[in-house]
Image: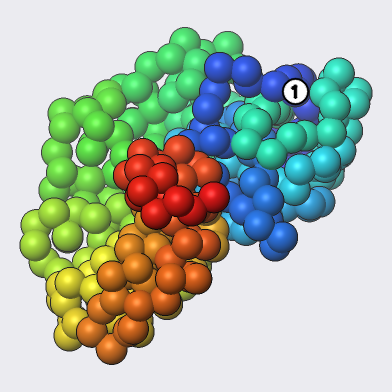
């Protein structure tokens, strides 16, 4: 069996994804407040690391990594434990320096693994192949779920998270939110922030606000922007915690600064209308409402027009 340490990473392609609006839908801003480009790295090896003009945390979404980069970046370096580092020079693939709010797709190949892998990492890689249909495999969610389970049972946090996703969406398995929560919990306890956020969302939907708050805090502390936003709302409404305007504004601002449009709108509304312990601040209200409007929020646009904010 060829182990992960014996595999080599090879960049097969990179291209702009013209019809993919992920970068403009899930906007992330750089330190100067400018929208980032989104580079999706398809079918990576578990534990991949990225070097270059990377902004914020890397998101792993069932078979692909989402890497946000400063606009104007021209290369990205990719590495996994025990493997040769691959440098993706965008110009080599006919791609100009990346643009803000634009999405790009990179496909990476790797050495074949055994048809009957045993290690958690190789089981996870086999599951990835079946999930997206790659490395000679046809897309097969049932097989993907089987191999994710084998990796998850060995403690692989990404496999645990992905298995939770498959149970929540009924991919290859019967939809079962309780099973989804079980696997999210295992992944969350292993420190995976996306699982912590999803687990918090399930707790929130079940009105277990104390647990939801706990998991949102853990996810937010690792940079999960949606968790920051949810914390802001929960502190504003006093859900699972005593109402606290100062904490609400703190978390809404963190999310807003990361480009979360709903956080920008809610933060603007809080400053516009005032809140317990927080006086109105029209200057801040205008800043955040205009940012939300610039991202296309219709309510923010309407309010800016009514108040003649430009």
Q: Secondary structure at mark 1?
A: strand
Could you tell me which residue is drawn at 50 percent across and 16 percent down? 133
Residue designated by label 1: 14
Rendered location of residue 244, percent (x, y)? 26, 84
- Residue closer to the observer: 220 or 130: 220
- Residue closer to the observer: 236 or 272: 272
Rendered location of residue 20, percent (x, y)? 54, 23
Q: Quadrant of residue 66?
A: top right
Q: How many marks?
A: 1
Could you tell me which residue is drawn at 43 percent across and 66 percent down? 285
Rendered location of residue 178, percent (x, y)? 13, 48
In the image, residue 256 above or below residue 83 = below
Answer left or right for 203 relative to 98. left
- Residue closer to the observer: 19 or 171: 19
What kind of colouring is applied to the model shown? rainbow
- Residue closer to the observer: 208 or 69: 69
Answer left or right for 171 relative to 65. left
Q: Quadrant of residue 206?
A: bottom left
In the image, residue 2 above or below residue 272 = above
Could you tell me which residue is drawn at 43 percent across and 15 percent down? 139
In the image, residue 63 above or below residue 217 = above
Could you tell me which residue is drawn at 76 percent across and 43 percent down? 71
């Amino acid at each position: 069996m060829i182990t992960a340490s014996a595999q080599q990473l090879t960049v097969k392609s990179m291209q702009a994804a013209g019809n993919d609006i992920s970068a403009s839908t899930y906007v992330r801003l750089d330190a100067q407040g400018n929208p980032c480009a989104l580079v999706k790295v398809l079918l990576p090896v578990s534990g991949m690391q990225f070097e270059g003009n990377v902004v914020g945390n890397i998101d792993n979404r069932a078979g692909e990594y989402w890497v946000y980069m400063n606009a104007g970046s021209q290369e990205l370096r990719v590495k996994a434990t025990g493997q040769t580092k691959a440098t993706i020079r965008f110009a080599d693939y006919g791609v100009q320096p990346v643009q803000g709010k634009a999405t790009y797709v990179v496909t990476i190949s790797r050495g074949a693994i055994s048809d009957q892998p045993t290690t958690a990492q190789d089981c996870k890689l086999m599951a990835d192949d079946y999930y997206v249909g790659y490395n000679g495999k046809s897309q097969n969610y049932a097989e993907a779920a089987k191999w994710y389970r084998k990796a998850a049972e060995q403690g692989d946090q990404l496999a645990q998270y992905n298995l939770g996703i498959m149970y929540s969406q009924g991919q290859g398995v019967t939809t079962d939110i309780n099973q989804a929560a079980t696997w999210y919990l295992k992944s969350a306890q292993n420190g995976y922030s996306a699982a912590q956020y999803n687990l918090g969302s399930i707790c929130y939907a079940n009105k277990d606000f104390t647990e939801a708050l706990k998991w949102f805090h853990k996810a937010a502390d690792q940079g999960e922007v949606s968790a920051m936003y949810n914390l802001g709302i929960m502190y504003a409404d006093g859900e699972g915690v005593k109402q606290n305007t100062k904490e609400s504004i703190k978390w809404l601002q963190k999310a807003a600064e990361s480009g979360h449009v709903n956080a920008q709108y809610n933060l603007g509304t809080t400053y516009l209308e005032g809140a317990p312990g927080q006086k109105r601040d029209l200057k801040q209200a205008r800043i955040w409402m205009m940012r939300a409007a610039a991202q296309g929020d219709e309510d923010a646009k309407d309010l800016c027009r009514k108040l003649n904010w430009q």
